[in-house]
Image (cartoon, rainbow, N blue to C red):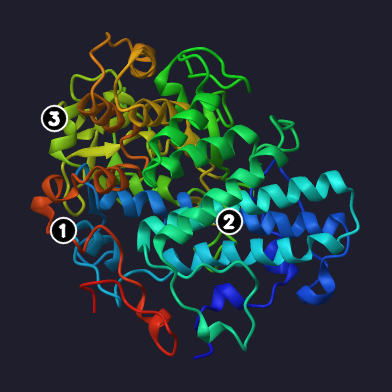
Amino acid sequence: MKNKFKYIYAVVALAALAGSCSEDFVSVDPKGSFLSTSYYKDEQQATAALVGVYDPLRKNTGGFENLVAMLNAGSDDFYAGGGGASDGQGIQNFSTHSLTSLIIPGSFWNDHYQGVYRANVLLSKMSGVNMSDALKVRFTGEAKALRALYYFNLVRMFKNIPLILEPLTTSTMLNVEQSAPTAVYAQIEKDLVEAIPALPTSVDAATGSGRLTRGAAQALLGKVYLYDGKNAEAAAILAQVNGTPGQANQYGNKLLAKFSDLWVVANKFNSESLLEVSHTSAGNSDWGFWGSGRDEGNSLNVMVGPRGYSRPANSNAADLPSGWSFSVPTQKLYDAMKTDPRFDATIFDLKALKAAGKADYIPGYQDTGYFLNKFLPRKTDVRTGGGAAELNYKQNSYVIRLADTYLLEAEALGATGARAQALLDAVRARVGLASIPVTLAAIKNERRMELAGEGHRFFDLVRWGDAATALSDRGFNAGTDEIFPIPYVELTGTKLKQNPNYE
């Protein structure tokens, strides 16, 4: 019983809140642990708490149970991969759509509610913090926007979730009940609407990279509206983010001229990025705390690398460290992308290199000979300092970027009209593709080509009602597998009820 909702109601301690959400944002020297009742006194303590609210963003590509690897595995474009059918049971079972309440990794629930709890505590304490009113407004906006993002992930993954807006106590934690998804979406939208005017239009690159901006919150709100079926509202807010297609928006964001530059490790917080997760190799992440929330490396990098990679001395093949062969591109994705200009930046064709005698590797589970190049590590990226080299890759990952919002707006416009056409054309023109008539089918295909391997495909298929058809060969059951089962441990001794058709 005492473990229920452990991340929602746990006592806040400085040690838990001081992990960096961005190597550029803030560095806090923890002096000890403080109870939440006596902690939030001044700007320094509020800043440390805010960093703690940002911290679960690392769930995107940090730790073995990261969102991108998990969501890729459940799509039609990737297999789970890894070392075998039992290598990461949760990711393997999601790939075959055979999850149960005992197999679903609990962190997909817990880590997001940890972020919600931290946001709730900070919001409840903000009025008493000794700091300027302007900073209070900004911190409040950031906390609300982050809470909205965590709830957006939760409602898409689990659908039937508790909506908690105040810190839970030992007397209230077991009485929590699930809310209607409509109520959750309404609160997400309310948080974002209130956060947008409180957020800055830009941040100082040296001190604020990784923090939320007005454009990032608007982009997220537009995406939320689209998932909530509010297409007109989605198109209106996304137009503020996108501006004139192909040109810089009001905040200075613009599509990068070269698609492959999106995946250059040093190209962090570039003009196309609206919200991204910062990873660092300076955190000395080690096996003792990997996946605990204290590790700061990009775990997806080592996960997608080929096993036992080698190359002859005279080979011009990429110099790669060995990895674990997860997120294996399917033959279907290869065939769909092979003539697309984004192919080389997206898929590393090791099958062809091996056939040409230029490289070799040890095939992993579900091997196709193809690997996810967007996150494939290079030897030059390997950490040589403290911690485990495998856990200290520093490539950032995008939560939302401008090409995504272009295509979201085009879809929200009903995939028709001059503006929807211009948005689609801009994404295609960036990679040298000619204009094609805008249709929903064209937008769907463009999202697949543009965003492959970034963790969007599964949610797109579910949102479009295409999952049952696209995943028919993966064991997908319509009416069940659109969402995850709620972890069993969260049900025991509480008022929560399991999702339909799950045990």
**Residue shown at the point (28%, 18%) measured from the top left:** 341
Instruction: State which tag comes first along the sequence, 1 or 3.
Output: 3
Q: Is residue 181 above or below residue 242?
A: below
Q: CA distance from mark 1 to mark 3?
A: 26 Å
Label 1 SS: loop
User: Which of labels 1 and 3 is toward the front?
Assistant: 1
Residue 342 horizontal side relative to residue 353, left or right: right
Picture disc at residue 147: 2
Residue 478 badge: 1
Closest to the observer: 309 or 337? 337
Residue 102, how many percent across, how many down? 30, 78
| Amino acid type indicated by mark 1 | Ala
Q: What whole-number distance in Å separates the C-alpha atoms at marks 2 and 1?
A: 30 Å
| Closer-to-camera residue (501/45) | 501
As measured in the structure, the alpha-carbon distance from the residue carrying label 3 to the one carrying label 2 is 39 Å
- Observer-nearest of 167 and 113: 167
Dot 2: few (<14), some (14–19), or many (≥20) neighbours within 10 Å?
Answer: many
Which residue carries the number 3 mark?
335
260, 152: nearer the viewer? 152
20 shown above or below 134: below
Locate residue 334, reporting x and y percent. Answer: 17, 32
Left or right of 114 in this view: 99: left
Label 2 or label 1, whichever comes before in sequence order: 2
**Callout 2 touching callout 1 (CB < 8 Å):** no
Type of amino acid at the residue the image marks with label 3: Asp
